[in-house]
Amino acid sequence: MEKKAKLPTTKAKAMSLHIGLNAVNPSEYGGWSGELSACEFDAKDMAAIAKSRGMKSTVLLTKKGTRANMLAALRSAAKQLAAGDLFFLTYSGHGGQVPDVTGEEDDKKDETWCLYDGQLIDDELYFELSQFAAGVRVLVLSDSCHSGTVTCCTTAARHDLAADWALKDDAACRGYAYLPRTPSIL
């Protein structure tokens, strides 16, 4: 007889992180400031939506949108959430590409988010998201260049995720997108 998974007896917790960068630190990007006009508004709007759905939200705008602040917020959420909970991550700002550091990218480039004080590569983002407990639903919305591949996982990692995630071949992603087996969006 097959065992059925136990359903949580408490209401699922939901947390969110919203990052909006209207500029980057020129000293970290060779003099380029990357000015944009509406990314902070995007982050505030997404946080308002999340709050209206009962989520505890963190917002990082431009100068607060640093690598350290973003990673700290992700790690804090990963420690607090358990199976059945939801983490909602949004990013609005520049995206980029850098030479592939691990050799798994077909195009030999890693995709990045251009945070205020330096780029965060897709491999780093994937690692941080993998630190959430099994069964935590993670939804990432990225409004940036190269955002279609910023959360794609490596070939080796696809096999590790197969038990917890349904994998969907996605031509736009040139790889895989993650779809929870039991989708439940906001």
Image (tube, rainbow, N blue to C red):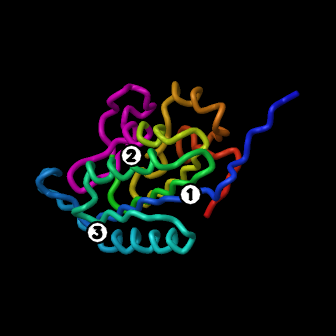
- What amino acid does circle 3 point to? Leu
Q: Assess disc 1: are there few (<14), some (14-19) or many (≥20) residues with their C-alpha within 10 Å of its C-alpha.
A: some
- What amino acid does circle 1 point to? Lys
Q: Is residue 13 above or below residue 111?
A: below
Q: Position of residue 55 (x, y in %)?
A: 51, 65
Mark 3 or 1: the one toward you: 1
Identify the mark at residue 75; answer none if there is no mark.
Answer: 2
Q: Position of residue 5 (x, y in %)?
A: 74, 39
- What amino acid does circle 2 point to? Arg
Comes first in the chain, label 1 or label 2 = 1
Q: Spatial distance from mark 2 to mark 3, Cα to Cα?
A: 28 Å
Residues marked 3 and 1 touching at CB (< 8 Å): no
Identify the mark at residue 36; answer none if there is no mark.
Answer: 3
Query: Please, what secondary structure does the residue beneath circle 2 have?
Result: helix
Residue at which label 1 appears: 13
Comes first in the chain, label 2 or label 3 = 3
Mark 2 or 3: the one toward you: 2
Count of numbered badges drawn on the protein: 3
Classify residue 133 as left or right of residue 167: left
Q: Is residue 136 above or below residue 99?
A: below
Q: Spatial distance from mark 3 to mark 1, Cα to Cα?
A: 33 Å
Q: Which residues are magenta?
A: 97-126
Q: Nearer the viewer, residue 107 or 81?
A: 81
Q: Residue at x 41, y 71 (%)?
A: 42
Q: Nearer the viewer, residue 173 or 22?
A: 22
